[in-house]
Amino acid sequence: MSRKRDRTHFSRHAPASNPKRRRPLPPQPPPEEEEKPTARPTPPPAVVVMGLPPDCSVLDLKSRFVIYGSISRIRIDRDAVGYIVYRSKESAEAAIAAALDASFGITIDSKRVISLGLFLSRVNFLFGYLESASI
C-alpha cells in the first residue's frame, strides 16, 4: 500500500477520523395552511380614449391623463384609440369626468378627445388581464 494509486485518498496527511462538525439546521416551523381567496382580485380600471390625432404618442397621452392619478399602462392602437389603465378606480373616474366636462374637456394637439368610460373586460384583456367583469 505504498503506491499512490492504491490509496483511497490523495493527501499527504492521514484522513481525519471524525468529519467536521456542522452547525445544526435551524428548526423549521410547521407548515401552516394558507387560506386561498375565494374571489379573484378585480383587475385595474381602464379608460378608452377615442379621437386621438394620428401622430399622438404615448407620452402625449400620458402627460394629459397622469394628472388624474397614477397610470399603470398605456396603449395606442393603429386606429387612434388609446387605452389607459389606472391603478385606482377613483383616478379613472376623475379622468372620465374631466374628459366629459362640457366647458373644458381634455385636448391633445388642440383636438378634443372623447373618453368612453370605465371598463374592466375587453380593455384589460388587451393588456393581459383575464377577468371578465364590466362596470
Image: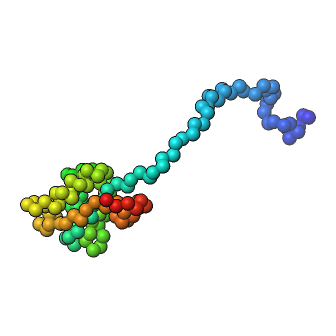
Q: Which residue is drawn at 21% across and 56% down?
A: 95
Give the colour scheme of this rendering. rainbow
Query: Which one is in front, 98 or 40?
Result: 40
Query: Left or right: where does residue 103 sit relative to residue 79?
Result: left
Name the quadrant of the N terminus: top right
Residue farthest along the bottom direction in this orientation? 79
Q: Residue at x 81, y 36 (%)?
A: 9
* 10 relative to 49, above or below: above
Name the quadrant of the C terminus: bottom left
Residue farthest along the left direction in this orientation? 103
Q: Which residue is drawn at 63% across and 28% down?
A: 27
Q: Position of residue 104 (x, y in %)?
A: 10, 60
Q: Where is residue 22 in the image (x, y as percent from the top left)?
A: 68, 27
Query: Which one is in front, 30 or 117?
Result: 117
Judge whether residue 127 can be spotted in this image: no
Judge whether residue 23 can be spotted in this image: yes
Q: How many tags in the picture?
A: 0
The quarter holding residue 122 reads bottom left
The quarter holding residue 18 reads top right
The quarter holding residue 11 reads top right
Q: Position of residue 61 (x, y in %)?
A: 22, 61
Q: Residue at x 30, y 70 (%)?
A: 77
* 21 relative to 103, above or below: above
Query: Left or right: where does residue 42 sit relative to residue 51?
Result: right
Query: Left or right: where does residue 17 sit relative to residue 48?
Result: right
Query: Which one is in front, 109 or 50?
Result: 50
* 22 relative to 34, above or below: above
